[in-house]
Amino acid sequence: MPNNSYAVDTNILIYLLDSSDNRKRNIAENILAENPKIPAQVLSEYLNVTRRLLNLPKADVVIQCAALLKDCEIIPVSCNTLTTAAGFIQKYGFQIFDSIIIAAALEANCTVLYSEDMQHGFKINGLTIVNPFI
């Protein structure tokens, strides 16, 4: 797969912290090694979960996240992203945050969105959702 043609959902990043499942952690590490695109919504969710899991001071969590994702492109959420997401909610019944992540990945011209939580193999406007753990 060409470098940077894919984005990741929050759960992929969370598995980087999971010492209880080496297989999933290794897969997540391999995906991150290719410097995927990170929707800003994923970044927000990751910071929130990481803060609770690691029980670190807020600034330390942000610094850890910046170091982890330093080579990744962060996809901003714009008004257009939100409008596109609203259309996905209406058409497919997606959850709000999933819709924003999908819309951002499409705006960044990604062809794959790695996610454990969304429907594996679902295709939408040239983007395929792939569960890398199955």
Image: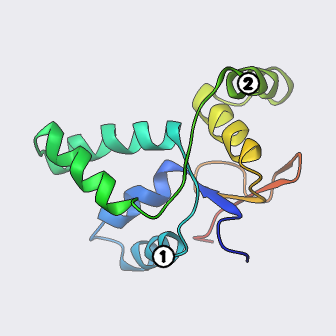
Name the image quarter holding the N terminus.
Answer: bottom right
Residue toward you, 11 or 43: 43
Above or below, 54 relative to 18: above
- Residue at left 10%, top 40%? 57
- Residue at left 32%, top 53%? 66
Left or right: 16 as drawn, with respect to 35: left
State which tag comes first along the sequence, 2 or 1. 1
The residue where tag 1 is placed is 33
Above or below, 29 relative to 93: below
The residue where tag 2 is placed is 80
Quarter of image, res 7? bottom right
Residue 99: % across, % down: 68, 33
Residue toward you, 58 or 121: 58
Residue 33: % across, % down: 48, 76
Q: Amino acid at mark 1?
A: Ala
Q: Real-space Cα distance between discs 2 and 1?
A: 29 Å
Quarter of image, res 69? bottom left
